[in-house]
Amino acid sequence: MVARACLGGALLAVTCVGCNLLLGGPDYKVTSTSGAMGGASGSVTGTGTSGAGTANTTSATNTTGSVAPNGTGVGTTTGASTGPGGPMLMAVQIAAGKETPSGLPQSNHIVYAKGGNRYWFFYVDATPNVIKSRTSTDFIAWGDGPTIAVPYDPAGDSRTFSVAYAHIGNSDVVHIAIALHSGNVREVDYVRGLLTGNTGSFTAAAKVTQMTNNPSGCDPEEPGITIDNGGLAHIISGWWNNATDWCDFNMFDATTADAGQPGFTTTFTGPTHQPISGLTNAHAMIPLGNGVMAFSDSGDVGIPDSSNMNSSAFAGTWPQYAPIYPAGMGAVQSRYDWSVCGKQGGVDVVRRVHNGGLNDQFQYLQYVNGSWTAGAAIPANPGLVNAGIVLLRGPTTLGLFAISADPTSSIHYTLSNGSTWSAWQNLVSGLGMRNHLAGSGCVDTAHPTLIWTQASASANDVYGVPLGSLLP
């Protein structure tokens, strides 16, 4: 049995009879514990024969949903609905982890390999000294992929690494930056992978930088990594080879461009070191035009939170970082409650601020022509502190996703048409407590994907959903 959450609704249990849960496969039935699509108690039943399958749909008012997930099988849903109308999407369990297997919104753990036509998810669990992977062609049936050896134990914390993907020279390549420590040794390492079908070949982890002191406030360290349009990898990390100054704004740049060939390796120059007054933990790196852009929290002294974000745009050299939000927008945010999303010719950034403990206000800025300007107002929505907020982009639509402060830690979303943001709507509820919202980033707008950590009786599981139909 595979548990899946109905978006906008409650727990669905899918029982498969002699199949692998692929749409259009052999007969299976769907039953609901408390009604589908956000409805009250009800049931969904259906039996179908093998066939191509039809898309899941709901009525416009969403008071009765028609489910045709498999061939000709059709079932009906009863019960008053409170969920939004629209596409019926399914949240699928991807993997079981230990601490924070989904990572953070600033990093990237899930990619879509265009050449292999499949999703790849990278994570760590209780197994020491490895990063694990899982793959799927349809986001429903997931299988184990290769493991990647790393020099130190991630201790089950996926907040310690990030993955960048590019399709180069007809090859699917990934570049991974991981920050691990053992005793007083703190080290940033780099791995390059070549993905082929459901397998992959990965280089041995190579040291980018190392420091040998014990700044516990620097843990966990979340490095950022991206690949520019010339095939060069770029890393940002708070760690660097220095005994007295750490948790700052440090960039490392690859010396050799990846052309997609087997056996590729590179070294890194740097760091370009820029001190910060305090300790930064969350970093992000995204492509921007012919260069890249690096981000971090502001690392304020004496408080566990941040009053701002910092950024620096690279185009051959790294200028000194600058605060993103002007003094007039000053507020306190949680370290992980911000997200960045690249677009043609610019960047979108959103942070959620505490607002006296309500944690319900968002500040949206756009980076265009070298400067930051205020974007359209985002409606207030109380959220779970430090659970992360995620920006994702489709071909024409920008979406913001957040975990609600309600008792079931529902996932809510709002959409932008370029000039206004919609009212918040419910995306996932029921099934279990959620945290550590993350996503696929904005490099691949054809396959936007949301993932999160969800507590179960035995583990912290990773669930996710592709959002192509929500973000056209």
Image (spheres, rainbow, N blue to C red):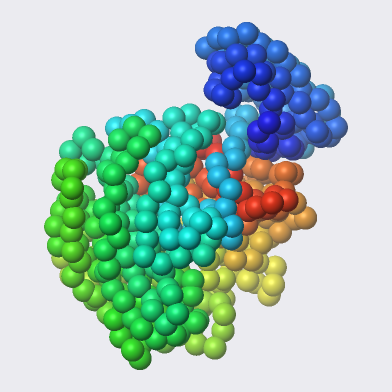
- How far from the left and from the top, in percent, is residue 200? 32, 41
Residue in the image at 65% along x and 14% along y: 27
- Left or right of residue 314: residue 88: right
Confirm whether residue 382 shows in the render: yes
Relative height, residue 344 to residue 349 (above, below): above
Number of callouts in the render? 0
The structure residue drawn at horizontal position 18% and vertical position 50%, both measured from the top left corner, is: 264
Side of 430 relative to 276 (left or right): right
Dividing the image into 4 quarters, which one contains the N terminus?
top right
In the figure, 174 relative to 295: above or below? Answer: above
Residue ID at (81%, 25%):
43
In the picture shown, does residue 329 fall above or below 6? below
Residue 451 at x, y percent in the picture: 54, 47
Residue 361 % position (x, y): 61, 64
Looking at the picture, how far across and down is residue 5, in whole percent?
Answer: 67, 37
Seen in the image, is 452 located left or right of residue 39? left
